[in-house]
Image (cartoon, rainbow, N blue to C red):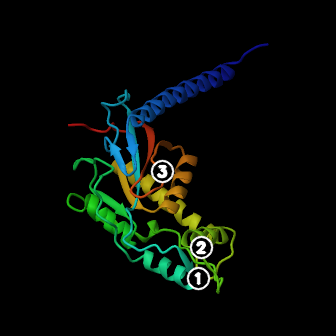
Amino acid sequence: MRISGQHILIILLFLMFAAQACAQKGLYDEIEDFYQGTKKEGYSYDPPLRFITENDIPLKDDQGIIQIFLIRHGIPKIDRANWVSYYQASSFVKAYDTVEVYEIKDVPVNIRADEIDNVYSSPLRRARSTAEQLFGQRFNIIYDSLFREFRNEIVPIPRIRLPLSVWRVSSRIFWMVGLHSSEVPGLPEERRRANRAAEQLANMAKQEGHVVLVAHGFINRFIIRYLKKNGWQHSYDGGFEYTNVQVLSKIIENYPAVEVD
């Protein structure tokens, strides 16, 4: 069989891209290994999570790493009754959006003043309160309704009492399958919003190098799904409990490496 010059070119291009993909996978493995050194116990991180720098992994001169930290809000200051009626559960959900969080004693991240200019946050009070406690003294905080939590509407079943957690979880399941009032945005609409939020975070990361968002459990999950589908690595999974952190990373070719003092 005769191999033409065009075939040789195609083979060489394939080998080049394959080698590049393998090299990037090796870098992503190193990023993952870096964060595996963090020990997590309850709400405490030892050491607190920080951004990767060019001193931590062997980047080439024309490579850079951009990262996004997603932080869930702290513990809301709200009483949680056990067995409650539909009306009490509905009142709880409404109040949940208005409360601050308890004092955060264990700071989950260590962000240097020269690494970011802004912290982004959901405008809901529990997220605002968390962002203010963690970053308000050092960084400008930008609140954007794009990062609000998906709304939860309690299913109206009168004359029975259930654990509050059952009301909330069952209502979320009903919402996910489309059984909710027209006043509440449905899952397809909220997924599109989460995708827009993820795109905005990715664009800001390309411009700024690092991005920090303080938001909520559900929307953070959907942001992560979108970013992973678009070439980001989920470098660290801290879970979705209060103040837990998710780390997303992306290696960029022909991008200035992160500068380190």
Give coordinates of residue 172: x percent, y percent: 61, 69
Look at the numbered discs 3 and 2 and tell me whether their residues touch, using CB distance below 8 Å: no
Do the CB atoms of the residues marked 2 and 1 lie less than 8 Å apart?
A: yes
Tell which of 216 and 59 is nearer to you. Answer: 216
Amino acid type at image mark 2: Trp
The residues tagged by marks 2 and 1 sit, at their Cα atoms, a distance apart of 8 Å
Closer to the eye: label 3 or 2:
2
Residue shown at 65%/86% (left/top)?
159
Q: Residue 167 got which mark?
A: 2
SS for dot 3: loop
Could you tell me how far apart the alpha carbons at marks 3 and 2 are, in whole angstroms?
Answer: 23 Å
Q: Is residue 49 visible?
A: no
Amino acid type at circle 1 is Tyr
Residue 35 seen by the camera: yes
| Crowd rating for badge 1 (residues with CA inside 10 Å; few <14, some 14–19, many 20+) | some
Mark 2 lies on a secondary structure that is helix
Picture disc at residue 86: 1
Badge 1 marks a residue whose secondary structure is helix
Quadrant assignment, res 135: bottom left
Measured from the top left, where is residue 105 in percent x and y?
A: 28, 56
Q: Which residue is mark 3?
A: 239
Nearer to us: label 1 or label 3: 1
- The amino acid on which the numbered mark 3 sits, given as a three-letter code, is Gly
Mark 2 closeness class: few <14, some 14–19, many ≥20 residues within 10 Å? many
Residue depicted at 41% across the width and 58% down the height: 242
- Number of numbered discs visible in the structure rendering: 3
In the image, is 199 to the left or to the right of 139? right
Relative to the observer, which residue lies in front, 233 or 12?
Answer: 233
Please state, as top left, top right, bottom left or bottom right, where the N terminus lies in the image. Answer: top right
When the figure is inspected, residue 222 is found, relative to residue 185, above or below; the finding is: above
Q: Which residue is painted at 38% across and 58% down in the image?
A: 213
